[in-house]
Image (cartoon, rainbow, N blue to C red):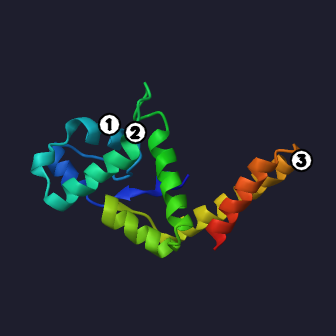
Amino acid sequence: MIANKARFRAARRLERAAGFRLPDHAFSGAFLESVERAINFEGLDRRTREQLLAFFRDFMDCRCRDAPFCGCPERKFVLTIIEFREMGLDHRQISGHLLDEYGIDLYPADILSFLEDSVHMLEAIRDVAELQGREELAENAIEHIKKIEH
């Protein structure tokens, strides 16, 4: 999954603020739990604090009992990438935006591969929906395919 490849660029700064070693994978359980509970936000520089707060606002806002281990942060991240693509950003622009907004490093090639895989998955959904006579679902899949491929 694409979320497993996302790294928080300022992980070393967060380590200094927390006082212990943190993984740099943004959606690893240890990172999510540590950042949520052990980071002194006042000890961070303004930019890192803003990026971390944006990360929490956009990906960690979840009411699940098992949060942050429920999978919601990863699903929200995946949807964000697809939404950026559907808004017209290419894989390089998406990578740059993730870095600027959230401090998340993700290679453009990984994003491109993820988007290609997403189109293949949507094509499969379209085909199954058509076989089952679920025209609305098939049309939604077709619309998303067009937006991603555009």
Identify the residue at the far front of this view: 136
Q: Looking at the image, can residue 114 be seen? A: yes
Q: Position of residue 134 (x, y in %)?
A: 82, 45
Residue 19 or 113: which is nearer the viewer?
113
Image disc number at residue 148: none
Q: Looking at the image, can residue 103 be seen? A: no
Is mark 1 in CB contact (under 8 Å) with mark 3?
A: no
**Local crowd size for mark 3, using a 10 Å CA cut-off: few (<14), some (14–19), many (≥20):** few
Sequence order check, earlier mark of 1 and 3: 1
Which residue is pictured at 38% across the width and 51% down the height?
A: 26
When asked about the image quadrant of residue 116, the answer is bottom right
In this view, the mark in front (3 or 2) = 3
3D distance between C-alphas at marks 1 and 3: 43 Å
Question: Would you place residue 146 above or below residue 60 in this image?
Answer: below
**Local crowd size for mark 2, using a 10 Å CA cut-off: few (<14), some (14–19), many (≥20):** some
Q: What amino acid is at disc 1?
A: Glu
3D distance between C-alphas at marks 3 and 2: 39 Å
Which residue, given by chain and number where applicable, does mark 1 sit on?
Answer: 33
Is mark 3 in CB contact (under 8 Å) with mark 2?
A: no
Q: What amino acid is at disc 3?
A: Leu
Which residue is pictured at 13% across the width and 58% down the height?
A: 45
Q: What amino acid is at disc 2?
A: Gly
Sequence order check, earlier mark of 3 and 2: 2
Which residue, given by chain and number where applicable, does mark 3 sit on?
Answer: 131
Q: Is residue 26 left or right of residue 44?
A: right
Which residue, given by chain and number where applicable, does mark 2 sit on?
Answer: 29
Where disc 2 sits, the SS reads helix
Where disc 1 sits, the SS reads helix
Which residue is pictured at 24% across the width and 46% down the height?
A: 21
Identify the residue at the far top of this view: 65
Q: Position of residue 79 (x, y in %)?
A: 52, 53
